Amino acid sequence: NRRFFLRWCLLTTVFLTLLVAPLPGLSQTAKETGKPKPPNELLENIFDGLAQGDFSKYSSEFSPVMKEVQTRENFLNLQKKIQKSLGKVRMMNYLGYYVQKGNYIHLFKCHFTKEKDDVLVKLVLDSNKPNALVTGLWLDSPALEK
């Protein structure tokens, strides 16, 4: 009986160790899997720049083409429109991303101080690398269409 008990303990310990040990396929980093990390910080910087009226902070991670399109004047118009219609960002939830023509389109559900409905934000990056640049930004809200 004692011998049986010791075998049972040994087998149970080995089984539990294998069960709890990390599997090689599950412990891969985002870099190894080719999946980008959620770019919450990029979007937070963009919204902070808008809220503070800081064009440099707002556009710091923009691609050269995006910087050409988003001039200081366009920035000021966008800032007024967002502050008037939506207010400031209260909460931001990352929903995921999809890839289209080499661009990584990240989706966020945001809540703003002046808008009770959810706002879908699409942040487009030119790659999934750590130094990816913003090539597009869309805010989908009926409040902005007024």
Image (tube, grey):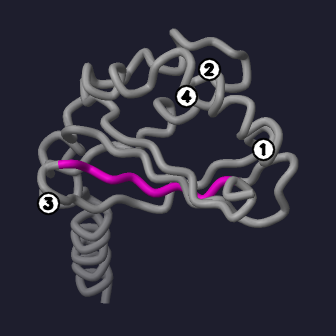
Q: What residue type is labelled 2?
A: Gly
Q: What element carries label 3?
A: loop
User: Which amino acid, mark 3?
Assistant: Gly
Secondary structure under the numbered disc 4 in the rendered image: helix
Q: At x 82% / y 56%, what residue is drawn?
A: 115
Query: Which label belongs to residue 25?
Result: 3
Q: Does the magenta stretch include residue 107?
A: yes
Q: Where is residue 60 in the image (x, y as percent from the top left)?
A: 43, 15
Range of residues picked out in magenta: 103-110
Looking at the image, residue 15 lies above or below residue 62: below
Q: Where is residue 101 in the image (x, y as percent from the top left)?
A: 13, 55
- The answer to whether residue 131 is left or right of residue 94 is left
Mark 4, residue position: 46
Q: Using the image as rendered, state which of residue 68 and residue 5 is in the foreground.
A: 68
Q: Distance between the residues labelled 2 and 3?
A: 39 Å
- The numbered mark, 4 or 3, whose residue comes first in the sequence reads 3
Dot 4 or dot 1, earlier in sequence: 4
Q: Earlier in the sequence, mark 1 or mark 2?
A: 2
User: Residue 5 appears in which quarter of the rendering?
Assistant: bottom left
Q: Is residue 101 magenta?
A: no
Q: Which residue is drawn at 19% across and 39% down?
A: 127
Task: Give the label on residue 49, or none.
Answer: 2
